[in-house]
Amino acid sequence: MTKRVAILISGGGSNMVSLVDSMTGDHPARPVLVLSNRPGAGGLDKAAARGVPTAVVDHRPFGGDRAAFEAALQTGLAMARPDILCLAGFMRVLTPDFTNAWAGRMLNIHPSLLPKYRGLHTHQRAIEAGDAEAGCTVHEVTAELDDGPILGQARVPIRPGDTAETLAARVLVQEHALYPAVLRRFAAGDRTPIFLP
């Protein structure tokens, strides 16, 4: 049975685009919703142009009430009846109540080789630490930030003279390859990790 996938975004949606564009042919999943917490997110137009329904649940009117925001998020998602929820540049920290409701069905991509560099500024932190390589990780989402079982990683060498911006650009290319590969396998019921060179 084809899995239904909803994707949460906050910005331009480049990872969302790579996921949506991959879900064709014999892929075991199809996109049913792209939802953003920002009304002006560029990814909404890209999703609509691909025929994917879109929705907005603006976090700002909720102030600091994360439970109320997440209740609205759940309502928006419920109408699309997704089997799998993919976070693709969704810049809100989700509460344990939300992540537990989606346990085993929610994926995220993070721009570091987890468990290194959870949180923000991952590329700068890798450069400052003198690491030889950086990369990205797709993992199941749990209540702990940027934690959960690792489903895939891709590695990118850090070059002399790299800035956070030049490194981020090369990592992003790998993100666009890794996330669709992991989603395809995950939607087919296979949680074996994928490691790209």
Image: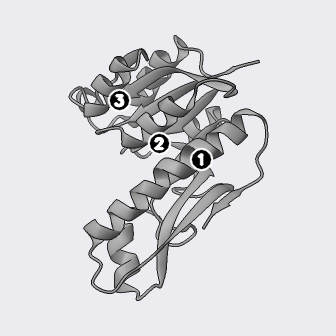
**How far is the residue under mark 2 from the one under mark 3?**
14 Å
Residue drawn at x 39%, y 45% is 89
Q: Amino acid at mark 2?
A: Leu
Q: SS of the residue at dot 2? A: loop
Residue depth check, mark 1 versus mark 2: number of the one nearer the observer = 1
Q: SS of the residue at dot 1? A: loop
Task: State the image coordinates of residue 140 (x, y, percent, origin top left).
Answer: 63, 48
Q: Which mark is residue 94?
A: 2
Could you tell me which quadrant the N terminus lies in?
Answer: top right
Marks 1 and 2: CB-CB under 8 Å?
yes
Marks 2 and 3: CB-CB under 8 Å?
no
Q: Which mark is residue 25?
A: none
Task: State the image coordinates of residue 21 (x, y, percent, origin top left).
Answer: 49, 31
Mark 3: few/some/many CA within 10 Å (<14, 14-19, 20+): many
Disc 1: which residue: 141
Instruction: Judge by depth and name the residue closer to the eye, 98 or 172.
Output: 172
Disc 3: which residue: 36
Residue drawn at x 64%, y 25% is 29
Task: State the image coordinates of residue 54 (x, y, percent, origin top left).
Answer: 38, 18
Q: SS of the residue at dot 3? A: strand
